[in-house]
Image: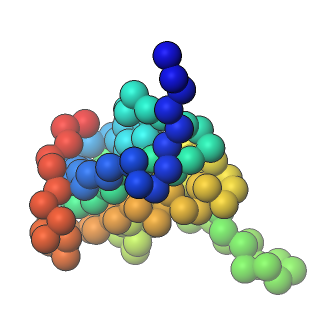
Amino acid sequence: MKTTHLNSETIQRKWFIVDAAGKSVGRLATRVAAILRGKHKPAFSPHYDCGDNVIITNAAHITFTGKKMQDKMYFTHSGHPGGGKTINAETLLAKKPTMIIQHAIRGMIPHNRLGRQIMKKLKVYSGTEHPHTSQKPEVLEV
């Protein structure tokens, strides 16, 4: 048998849409990260971006299990001395609902140039409206 290697001509990308309303953040993020990386495909290569595009809608209506909504803290730093800030998940969900899902998925993909390229295929929206109807996305059940 011959070993087939992926390249830009042989890969076929699809568009998927996921409704995040009422879904748990971690379970949604693991499924979406696998789709973005291409691990669901038989011709998966860890060194090549062979994943699909994912649109996540209703990011403002995600849930956490347990008391994570009040207890989970997100840390950011401005780069200046004393520039660290922490914010809990409930406040972050009210201010920037897309940030929680992006942060969870970013932690599940490689932390290098390939990971930055993969993250460009993720589109997160807080409401139901999105500008990607012309790509004809397939509904992905999580």
Name the outermost residue toward the bottom.
80
Q: At 38% across and 42% down in the image, what residue appears?
A: 35
In the picture, measured across the screen, residue 114 lies left or right of residue 64, that is: right
Q: Residue furthest top?
A: 1
How many marks on residues?
0
In x, y percent, where is residue 79?
79, 79
Whole-percent x, y for residue 86 in the image = 63, 65
Would residue 100 be visible to someone looking at this image? no
**Does residue 40 appear in the picture of this structure?**
yes
In the depicted view, which residue is nearer to us: 10 or 17?
A: 10
Vertical comparison of 109 with 129: above or below? above
Q: Position of residue 24 (x, y in %)?
A: 33, 40
Q: Does 3 sit above or below residue 76?
A: above
Q: Residue at x 69, y 56 (%)?
A: 112
Quick one: 82 or 42, which is closer to the camera? Answer: 42
For this orientation, the residue located farthest to the front is 2
In the image, residue 3 sits, relative to residue 118, either above or below, namely above
Residue 59 horizontal/vertical position (percent): 29, 60
Whether residue 66 sits left or right of residue 61 in the image: it is right
How is the protein colored in the picture?
rainbow
In this view, 86 is above or below 78: above
Lateral position of residue 91 relative to residue 13, left or right:
right
Q: What residue is drawn where x is 53% and y is 26%? A: 3
Dividing the picture into quadrants, the one containing residue 96 is bottom left
Pick the quarter of the image with the C terminus: top left
Residue 61 position by quadrant: bottom left
For the point 49% across and 43% down, the residue is 6
91 left or right of 124 in image = right
